Image (cartoon, rainbow, N blue to C red):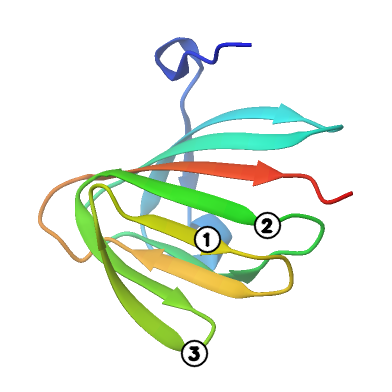
Amino acid sequence: MVLDFEKMPVTPMEHFKGGEGTLDVRKFDDPAMGAVVRLTMPAGSTIGMHTHVGNCEVVYVLAGSGVCYYDDTVYPVKAGSIVYCPEHHAHSICNTGEEVMELLGVLPKSV
């Protein structure tokens, strides 16, 4: 299967996971397998802190820079960084840069 995010509809989402600002979301969701999401985050926007239950998440930073809060630790992230959040752990991502931040998230369903 090949996913073409450029052909997927964009859904603007305010306060994504309780965060700040409006993110553009493109999402492929398969109830049996999980989801793949592409997020566009304007400068100053955030993904709210949330805990993964029923899945984990791998986030690849495609563009931009910011910080990732993972449980009680803060990590700088930039294009090329990968964030891994196992099931039952919490994370948040903040675009602290001046440019748009692009993320690709893979959320395989736990078995």
Disc sitting over residue 56 in the figure:
2
The reply to whether discs 2 and 1 touch (Cβ–Cβ < 8 Å) is yes
Q: Position of residue 107 (x, y in %)?
A: 65, 45
Q: Position of residue 12 (x, y in %)?
A: 45, 37
Q: Please, is residue 79 above or below residue 71 in the view?
A: above
Q: Choose top left, top right, bottom left or bottom right for residue 96.
A: bottom left
Element type at mark 2: loop
Residue at horizontal 54 percent and vertical 15 percent from the top: 3
Alpha carbon distance from label 2 to label 1: 8 Å
Q: Position of residue 61 (x, y in %)?
A: 33, 48
- Pointer 1: what residue? 84
Farthest residue to the left: give it. Answer: 98
Q: Residue at the location (54% across, 83% down)?
A: 71
Q: CA distance from mark 2 to mark 3?
A: 17 Å
Q: Nearer the viewer, residue 93 or 56?
A: 56
The secondary element bearing badge 1 is classed as: strand
Would you place residue 110 above or below residue 27 in this image? Answer: below
Residue type pointed to by label 1: Tyr
The residue to which callout 3 is attached is: 72
Q: Amino acid at mark 3?
A: Asp
